[in-house]
Amino acid sequence: MTIICDLFFQRLNLIKTDYPQNRWKRLVLHPCWDKRRCLQIIFELVAASVKLEDLIIHSGYSSGYVKTRLIWPEISTGVMPLLKTVTIHCKEDSFVGQLKLVELLLGNAIVLEKLVITFEKKQVTAVEKNNFVEQVSRFRKASTNANVVFA
């Protein structure tokens, strides 16, 4: 299992290059969402992980984050040929980043079997969760077998 955390994401944010291919099968990411390139970096790492089957993302703001309006760049994604299981742990007040992440994963993981989304914010209201579920249900799925589970 390969784990990439906040500090590494901050350094990757400064690099404007392609990442070398690797043979990681399971990848755990603790990204910092305070950089515009964060979502792009996630997809570049996933694209470079040609054997990746299991992806776990603990999505939340880094400790020094000052909330501002995030601007999502155009994300260049490739087909994710082996990605079967994705788990996203949502930890923040605004789910904009997670929604974009879910949309891109569902739309590009062609053999995805299971996408698990957990809400770790202590006081996620039923309305917030229902809005999130409703938006996710409208996303296009590249895999007809993809099952989205909310925990």
Image: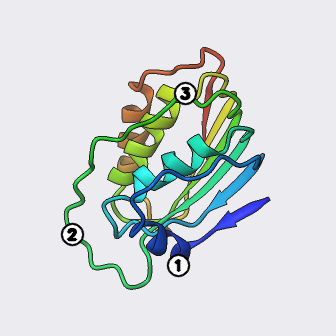
Determine crowd level at label 1: few under 14, some 14-19, many 20+ residues with C-alpha closer than 10 A.
few
Separation of disc 3 and disc 1 at Cα?
27 Å
Q: Which mark is residue 68?
A: 2
Rendered residue at 47%/67% (across/down): 12
Contact (Cβ within 8 Å) of mark 1 with mark 2: no
Question: Whole-percent x and y of residue 112?
Answer: 65, 28
Amino acid type assigned to the residue bearing label 2 in the image: Thr
Question: Whole-percent x and y of residue 69?
Answer: 19, 62
Determine crowd level at label 2: few under 14, some 14-19, many 20+ residues with C-alpha closer than 10 A.
few
Amino acid type assigned to the residue bearing label 1 in the image: Leu
Which residue is identified by label 1? 7
Of the residues under marks 1 and 2, which one precedes in the sequence?
1
> Which SS class for mark 3?
loop
Residue 52 versus residue 55: which sits nearer the camera? Answer: 52
Residue 38 placement: quadrant: bottom left
Determine crowd level at label 3: few under 14, some 14-19, many 20+ residues with C-alpha closer than 10 A.
some
